[in-house]
Image (cartoon, rainbow, N blue to C red):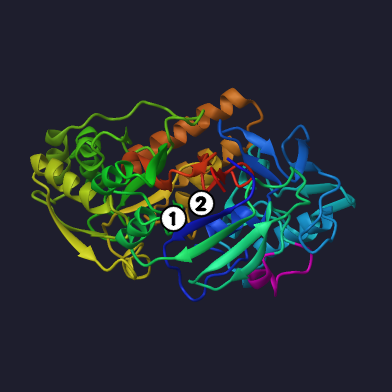
Amino acid sequence: PDRGGTLRIARPPASDAETLDPASSLSAYEYLGALYNRLVRVAANGELAPDLAESWETDAKARTWTFRLRKGVAFHNGRAFTSADAAYTLRHILDKATASPQAAVLAPLIDPEKLGTPDAHTLVVPLKSPNAEFPSLLTHYNCYVIPDGSAKSIGRTGIGTGPFKLESFAPAGPGRVTAYKDHFAGRPVLDAIAFYSVADMSARSNALLAGQVDLLSQTNLDFATARVVAASDRATIARVKNAQWYVLPMLTTEKPFTDVRVRQAMKLAYDPEHVVKVALQGAGTPGWDNPVPPSDPAYISAHPKHDPEKAKYLLKQAGHEGLAMDLYTSSYDPLFTPMALAYQDSAKRAGIRIKVKTASADSYYTQIWMKKPLMATYWFTGRPVDQLFTQIFRSGSSYNETAWSDKQFDAVLDKARAEIDDTKRRELYGEAQTLVIERGGAMTPMFADRLVGISRKVRGYAEHGFEFDYLGIGLKGA
């Protein structure tokens, strides 16, 4: 890329309650990555990497973690970053008034009153129980570091240590960030990023093709649109391998999914390879009901095979022969409906009759998700394995979308966290995967490559997890 220029990003509309407070933000992902840094980040290879913490170590029992913080870092308002800010950020996440989704992950581990700041560049975190994976939990996007005492204003000011600083922000509307020349890793290539809220996917795609925007954020293009974009003079496609995992969650507190035999039958009834072929036209990987992506070091490939006859047998045993279910989907994501129809088609062989129902996109995550017994959803990959299991599968987590509660799974997770030996810990996470596959309520048909629409002027687009490289991205002919 050439130095300078403004990158124009089209993003889906959010609610009027949209906030720049990282601890409670659920939609402003693009702003967060530009404005803030975390203590620890996930590198492109999936390993943990330094961010505001240069290094970290634990005691022999993984009970107390010590983070050595980077010196010479300043917030956008000129204030020096210290251990007081790091400790305050954790307390803010844990404060019930913040209502942070990450609180359910961290609260069982951290007593906010016991955080230690022996000097300006050292943070000591004593844990209530051992956790050898603790630093990985700080890579979540709710864990961006904010200034000490900023809770009441941070949602509007966006003051962080990131490569860009806030110029303007309107919840659910437009906004702009400008290059922060004093960023510790150097000035970003771009001069600014402008954000536009565009109502639906076709409108975002048309804006890209017309040269009105340069990048479509939080938008996985369907294949027909991707072909049109790739064939245009102005735009092309960036393909991010296995960037999203797609789920058909069964609510385990609702009949018939209270019965593990029905859940097992629903999984055995369909062929994930068929779903990938039909819904993704091959641009992805079969999930085999394991939410851990194949690229994760802890991933296990073992799984039960597609077996419609066994599915029929289990349903008969459970008293649900010829099961008929509504499966909810929406246009919120272009792959929801193709995935639902592919599942419907595949599960027929086991005598399962699926009726696909399309719900409104704008109320899908308030009226359907975690409320209907069977529906379609997706998550971004890039979560470390302990974060993934704790946030989405552990009993009582606010993001446990199937409401699955399994004491053995929780116990295996606790045991894995306390295990210092990397090999043994990986084996325990393998055991946890087996329990999710065999007993859990989440069907994971596929990991999808994300097809991102970008202008042909964009250079240096590299995405991982929830964000791209804000320092390196730029424009040719800026």
Most extreme residue toward the right, as rendered?
A: 119
Residue at left offset 85%, top offset 56% = 80
Residue 125 lies, in percent from the top left, at: 77, 48
Residue 291 lies, in percent from the top left, at: 40, 40
Does residue 107 appear in the picture of this structure? no
Which image quadrant is residue 71 in? top right
Task: Report the magenta residues as a range.
Answer: 147-158
Q: Which of marks 1 and 2 is nearer the N terminus?
A: 2
Question: Is label 1 in contact with label 2 (beta carbons under 8 Å)?
Answer: yes
Magenta span: predominant SS is loop
Residue 131 lies, in percent from the top left, at: 66, 40
Residue designated by label 1: 400
Most extreme residue toward the front, as rendered?
A: 477
Q: Give the SS element for disc 1.
A: loop
Q: In this view, does 303 lie above or below 127?
A: above
> For this rendering, which residue is in front, 290 or 163?
163
